[in-house]
Image (cartoon, helix red, strand yellow):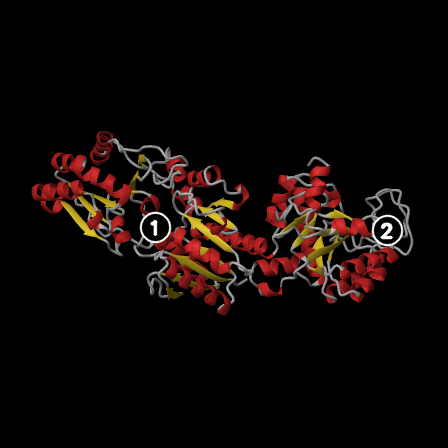
Amino acid sequence: MSLRILHVLSSNFFAGSVAYALQLAEKQNALGHDVFMATDQGGLSDHITCLTLPVSDRSLLQRFHNIRFLRKIIREHDISVVHAHSRAASWIAHYAVRGTRVPLISTIHGRQVKHSSLKSNDIYGEKVIAICPQLREHLINELHMEQQNVLFLPNPLDLEKLRQIRRTRIDDGKVVISVVGRLNGPKGAHIAGLVSNVFPRLLEQYPNVSIRIVGGEWDSFPQAGRDAFEMSQSRFGERLQYLGFTRQVLEIMADSDLVIGAGRVAMEALALKTSTFALGEACCHGLVTNDNLDDAICTNFGDILSVITLFTPDYPAITDELEAFISGTTAAEITESKLSQIYDINMIMPEVISAYSSAIMRKLSPNPIPVLMYHRVPDAPIATKHRTFVTRENFEKHLRFFSRRGLQSLTFRDYLAFSTGDRPLREFPRKPFILTFDDGYLDNHLNMLPLARKYGYTGVLFLLGDFTADRNFWDSGEDAEANRIMTTEQKKDFVEQGWEIGAHTLTHPHLTQLSDEEVLHEVRESKSRLEDGLQTKIVSFAYPFGTYDDRIKEVIKQAGFDFGIATDSGGIMIEDDRFAIFRINMFPEENVFSLFKKTSAWYRSYYRRKRGK
């Protein structure tokens, strides 16, 4: 799997969003994806192609040039997905992908203002990544974004690299506190409050304490903070330092006894095993421990609340808590495994790629793809209580109708290849539909396959993993001859003619009635035996009798399937839930009107309304 990814971001100053984008881009590059970055500053990375683009310049003329530039890059490099990391980046990227088959994903790092000039949230693309739960709530409740399109994925950390950064400072009994963050905006105001109201007392009461301030934008630092800094420095000398902006910030945090910060700063400090005091733009969590870690994560360590509230730090309380830390009466204990489970980039990256994959398919296919379910294709009508057959003559009428309507067949294997970048987006059919056949009846080989080949269609054949099964034994009282199953060689004919083979368990049971061990055996063994016996990769699984629940879906995922296929239940779109894909039953009496209805984009919504689902 190899995607061609274009990251677009503002980088006129080095914020957490820039570090986030670089972290993603370099990891994606290491995983074998083709990665490009368009941003204000060229040369941000030695490992990926960085294209200089004044993203932060919001003048109308420059925006027009930026859009043209991005469209050129998208076309020339056959970009699969564009990932924007700021509002300015999302705006130009939205217009750059307009009219193309390339999707846009935006990661949002802070609260968004709904501009009156924007009619909708379309500028953010097909999927939105929110870096903390409180931000996700804000986007859904205040900006009214679609809930299923907003994901919570935290800032990823390369924990392996961070663990290589060692503390070098000798333990000399001194306590070093580092304040890390921008000195402008609300954070600058809060740091100025610390410099004015907290640090003088700490430096006076504890001669072993020294404090370092790390961050850019000194010229924007509130005047009160600058005055207080100069006054304290005149009293305490080098025990209070301003180090400015530095790329050695991780090493500085590793050599600190306590880091005061928010957002990515707090996350990295914790990963470096440095005690952390979370003070952000929106709230103060104080010293981060196992007890308040979850709350801190929800707000991105104090930076974001779902609803705006007036926040003024309680400086006396902050002073008391810092004094307790310095004196050793309180300590910050964080379970490392808990941190790894949340922030490890190796855990988060698959979720990001999955979001790309889903966005690609939502853009390629904005309307539902009809997934049709057939079983038998006999020469003449048969006795069956379920009416799961379409005669050979009628099936050819179906194919003729599909052909005249301009429908193009697709398989789940094809769908996956487009979603992962293994096939060019330009090859995706304009009017796709998916033909599926369950169980592998003999008449599928004798009657259906020649007709499908005649009309140029392929589909998905769901088979049992038990190759000794020669007939349908799960539906009693039906025509024995019509229930005959294909031989192994006949099944191989479908593989040779480009059909996808999907799994349908070993013995066709009601999976919801089985134990976890029995379900796992039915699912895994069917996949393994089909892949070995037919020498083809199995990516899809059809639930026998259409029965499944969340437990069954989870087993299907664990077994390595990419799709779970239902019958008359599931989402409107495949991307609503790839493990609950809605199929449309095809019956003996289908006519032109019913075929038109069942292959129309509106049918699933109509079906659900009609049945109150």
SS of the residue under disc 1? helix
Tell me if residue 455 can be seen.
yes
The spot of residue 385 in percent (x, y) is 86, 42
Q: Nearer the viewer, mark 2 or mark 1?
A: 1
Left or right position of 198 against 90: left
Report the residue marked by disc 1: 16
- Gap in angstroms between the C-alphas marked 2 and 1: 62 Å
Please name whichever residue, 365 or 201, is drawn nearer the observer in this view of the structure.
365
Residue type of the residue flagged with mark 2: Asn
Residue type of the residue flagged with mark 1: Gly
The spot of residue 462 in percent (x, y) is 74, 53
- Residue 483's tag is 2
In the rendered image, the vertical position of residue 312 relative to residue 61, given as above or below: above
Q: Earlier in the sequence, mark 2 or mark 1?
A: 1
Residue found at x 45% / y 59%: 28
The quarter of the rendered structure image containing the N terminus is: bottom right
SS of the residue under disc 2? loop
In the rendered image, the vertical position of residue 322 relative to residue 364, given as above or below: above
Residue found at x 34% / y 38%: 302
The quarter of the rendered structure image containing the C terminus is: top right
The spot of residue 541 in percent (x, y) is 68, 51
Residue found at x 35% / y 33%: 309
Please name whichever residue, 80 or 599, is drawn nearer the observer in this view of the structure.
599
Left or right position of 16 against 255: right
Q: Determine crowd level at label 1: few under 14, some 14-19, many 20+ residues with C-alpha closer than 10 A.
A: some
Q: Quadrant of residue 49?
A: bottom left
